């Protein structure tokens, strides 16, 4: 009974591990996007131009990139929070599985001890019976 439940919990642990790995990849992608946008925003700061229209377009583009950068920062923060939540769920499930493994191990040890005592009792009974006959 416990073995079947343990198997289910181990499968859940594996699934949570896969989910965490996927979330970690998503977080890395969001970080890469943030870094790329930050690079473009920073590169827009340099380069002076004598033309007012070019300067105005550059400011408008920089404003849009800053808005995108803010949105990407929010996405990165959200991906980080989701990653933390998946990590906590994974650790909780790991604790559950380890507890169940210890329980199953203790039950097996108790069964083995019970079996040994039973066998020893049978041997003792046999020896006591043989001693009375002899």
Image: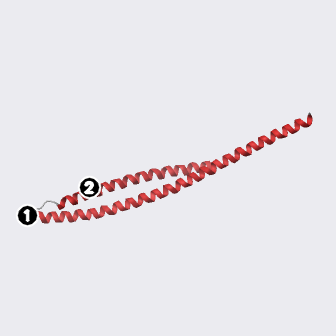
Q: In which quarter of the image is residue 131?
A: top right
Q: Is mark 2 on a helix, strand or loop?
A: helix
Q: Is residue 16 left or right of residue 129?
A: left
Residue 16 horizontal side relative to residue 71, left or right: right
Q: In this view, does 127 lie above or below 8?
A: above
Residue 68 quadrant: bottom left
In terms of sequence position, does the residue under pointer 2 or pointer 1 come before the other? 2
Residue for badge 2 = 36
State how far apart marks 2 and 1 are (Cα).
27 Å
> Is 39 positioned to the left or the right of 21 in the image?
left
- Residue 51 - label: 1
Q: Residue 102 carries which label?
A: none
Query: At 66% across and 46% down in the image, what residue appears?
Result: 108
Residue 118 lies, in percent from the top left, at 77, 43
x then y, percent, for residue 61: 19, 63
Q: Is mark 1 on a helix, strand or loop?
A: loop
Provide residue 115's location: percent of width, then percent of height: 74, 43
Which quarter of the image is occupied by the C terminus?
A: top right
Name the spot of residue 50 as percent of width and height, x first: 7, 63
Q: Which residue is drawn at the image coordinates 38% and 59% (left, top)? A: 79
Residue under the point 8% across and 63% down = 51
Residue located 17% across and 65% down the image: 59
Residue most extreme to the left? 50
Query: Toward the viewer: 106 or 11?
Result: 106
Q: Is residue 65 left or right of residue 101?
A: left
């Amino acid at each position: 009974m416990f073995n079947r439940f343990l198997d289910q919990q181990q499968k859940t642990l594996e699934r949570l591990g896969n989910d965490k790995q996927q979330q970690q990849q998503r977080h890395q992608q969001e970080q890469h996007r943030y870094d790329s946008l930050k690079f473009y925003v920073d590169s827009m700061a340099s380069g002076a131009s004598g033309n007012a229209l070019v300067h105005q377009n550059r400011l408008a583009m920089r404003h849009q990139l800053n808005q995108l950068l803010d949105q990407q920062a929010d996405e990165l923060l959200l991906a980080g929070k989701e990653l933390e939540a998946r990590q906590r769920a994974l650790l909780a499930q790991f604790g559950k599985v380890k507890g169940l493994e210890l329980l199953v191990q203790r039950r097996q040890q108790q069964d083995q001890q019970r079996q040994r005592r039973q066998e020893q009792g049978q041997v003792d009974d046999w020896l006591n019976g043989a001693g009375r006959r002899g």
